[in-house]
Amino acid sequence: MALTIGLTGGIASGKSTVANMLKEWNIPVVDADRIAREAVNVGEEAYVRIVETFGKDILQKNGEIDRAKLGALIFHDEEKRNQLNAIVHPAVRKKMLEQRDEILQKNPVVVLDIPLLFESNLTHFVDKIIVVYVDDAIQLERLMKRNGFSQEEALARIHSQMPLSEKKVYADAVIDNNGTIDQTRQQLLTILSEWDVL
Ligand SMILES: CC(C)(COP(=O)(O)OP(=O)(O)OC[C@H]1O[C@@H](n2cnc3c(N)ncnc32)[C@H](O)[C@@H]1O)[C@@H](O)C(=O)NCCC(=O)NCCS
Ligand SMILES: Nc1ncnc2c1ncn2[C@@H]1O[C@H](COP(=O)(O)OP(=O)(O)OP(=O)(O)O)[C@@H](O)[C@H]1O
């Protein structure tokens, strides 16, 4: 029987790390962040609407969206963030569901890696939910390190999402990613074997 698993968590909590393990085991993963990046390529409908809404100041010299600039804008302003979400999310949802359906024609299982699974009310599109969890301090530390953000920049991003402690409550399974990568892999293996995926 077909199974759609939602993989979520907070920014820099370790979703991509878990998604990479799944891919190594040949479990197909649909990556919402990647689809969102493709949706705003030059010339796409969402690109045009973003330029109309936020102006040409958020473009690089070559015409592509300056993601750092747009990020600095929307992670500090909820209204602007909602405007951007309203432009990008419908396109992402459509593409993601198309990819899910295509994969399920050939595979019994698909994983949708969606950072904003709860925030965007997408839970009804998945059968089971895995939340990748880390403590606040570790999330902040890993995000600052990975992106070279100041504490203020990192906190703005973290606070634009539902708290991880809340996401944990709605999960069918929680991976505690505070420890080593190996400990995370073990937890993932246990969950997948309980769900008869591996
Ligand atoms: C603001 C943008 C240009 C910043 O780009 P940047 O390359 O710095 O970040 P990237 O896209 O890799 O996202 C990194 C992480 O930020 C978080 N995040 C991104 N967008 C949002 C948002 N609108 N609200 C809350 N968190 C977000 C997610 O955890 C995501 O994994 C970009 O994130 C964007 O276009 N966001 C809107 C689309 C979106 O919601 N994407 C995420 C899920 S589909
Ligand atoms: N168990 C771990 N131990 C140490 N570092 C880790 C661990 N898990 C992930 N990391 C590191 O933490 C950072 C965030 O992890 P990752 O990119 O997987 O998070 P993410 O949830 O996909 O982030 P985003 O929402 O921004 O896409 C990365 O630099 C990654 O290498």
Image: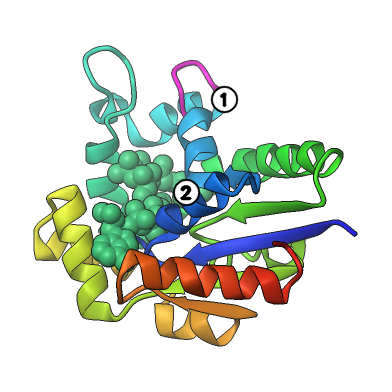
Q: Which mark is residue 45?
A: 1
Front position in the image: 56 or 47: 47
* Stretch in magenta: 40-44
Name the colouring of the figure. rainbow
- Label 2 secondary element: helix
In the figure, is residue 177 to the left or right of 148?
Answer: right
98 up-or-down from 135: above or below = above
* Residue 169 % position (x, y): 55, 87
Name the kind of residue labelled 1 in the image.
Glu
Quarter of the image for residue 70 reads: top left
Classify residue 91 by image quadrant: top right
In which quadrant of the rendered image does the C terminus lie?
bottom right
Q: Quadrant of the N terminus?
A: bottom right
In front: mark 1 or mark 2? Answer: 2
Q: Residue 36 at what x, y percent from top left?
A: 50, 39
Tag count = 2
Q: Is residue 81 visible?
A: no
What is the crowding at mark 2: few (fewer than 14 residues within 10 Å), some, or many (at least 20)? few
* Nearer the observer, 198 or 169: 198
Residue 30 x, y percent position in the rendering: 61, 44
Which of the two discs, 1 and 2, labels the residue nearer the N terminus? 2
When the figure is inspected, residue 26 is found, relative to residue 12, above or below; the finding is above
* Residue at position x 48%, y 24% in the image: 48
Q: Is residue 6 above or below residue 27?
A: below
Instruction: Name the residue that disc number 2 marks.
Output: 20
